[in-house]
Amino acid sequence: MTVKFDQPLIAGRLIRRYKRFLADVELSDGTVVTAHCPNSGRMTTCIGPDWPVQLSRSDNPRRKLPYTLEMTHNGHCWIGVNTLRTNAIVHHALRQGHIPELAGFDQIRTEVPLGGNSRIDFLLTFGNKKCYLEVKSVTLKSDADFVSFPDAITRRGQKHLLELRQAQDQGDQAAVLFLVQRTDAERFRPAWEIDPSFSETLAKLHSEGLTIMAYQAQVTPQAFAFKGSLPVVLAKR
């Protein structure tokens, strides 16, 4: 299963990322542009000076920055860094039935209210059966064959986990899917050393019935290819 880009991407070389959401990129003709970087994390291990990058370009006249940073290359593989793409990839995989753990649901809703003022990424339903699904984008490589989440303390992620617990308490199914957007790792684990509170909550909720999945996407300048699942290791190392 692949999700293609609407328009060809534009190759460049990263000069720097700054102020979290800005990146200066030199294009192949020598022009330097400032691109929007739609990733609020630290982006550790997925970005660096002089790395090859790919940009998309919007024709929307209302946009202050027409370019968007889509992916970087670390010398081994492309890494998807535009977190706004994550849910679209998972949504397509759900519709195509490529996630066996979530098979059997016939309706998919997005951005569904749950708890206080939060929204969960997906609500899957089949008759009276419900499953609330939260999706997280994974770009951090923590060691030789592991990728991890998060790459910075995430109070928002912690809040989503606690809201999924509310869904479980109501008798509904709840799940978290970690979409790994790089292919140079073989296993997933929570980043205990970065956010022990999130990691502990994730492990505890799994013991109470929370479904936890990690799937890998192969990123190229042409498309995202949804690959198979990765083993999930929840124990603290």
Image (cartoon, grey):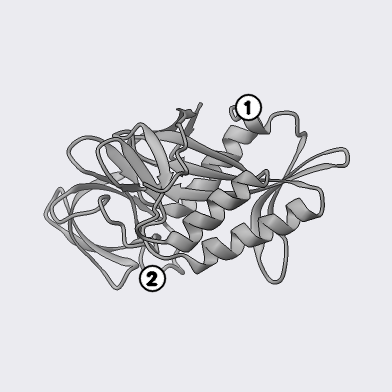
Q: Position of residue 186 (x, y in %)?
A: 35, 31
The residue at the point 46 percent across, 65 percent down is 154
Left or right relative to 149: residue 99: right
The residue at the point 58 percent across, 51 percent down is 204
Left or right relative to 207: residue 237: left
The residue at the point 74 percent across, 51 percent down is 168
**Mark 2 Cα shell of 10 Å, populated few (<14), some (14-19), many (≥20):** few
Quarter location, residue 115: bottom right
Name the residue at the right extreme: 128
Q: Tag 2: residue type?
A: Lys
Q: Nearer the viewer, residue 15 or 157?
A: 157
**Residue contact at pointers 2 and 1, CB within 8 angstroms:** no
Image disc number at residue 100:
1
| Residue picked out by circle 2 | 64
Q: Nearer the viewer, residue 136 or 196?
A: 196
Does 106 appear above or below 130? above
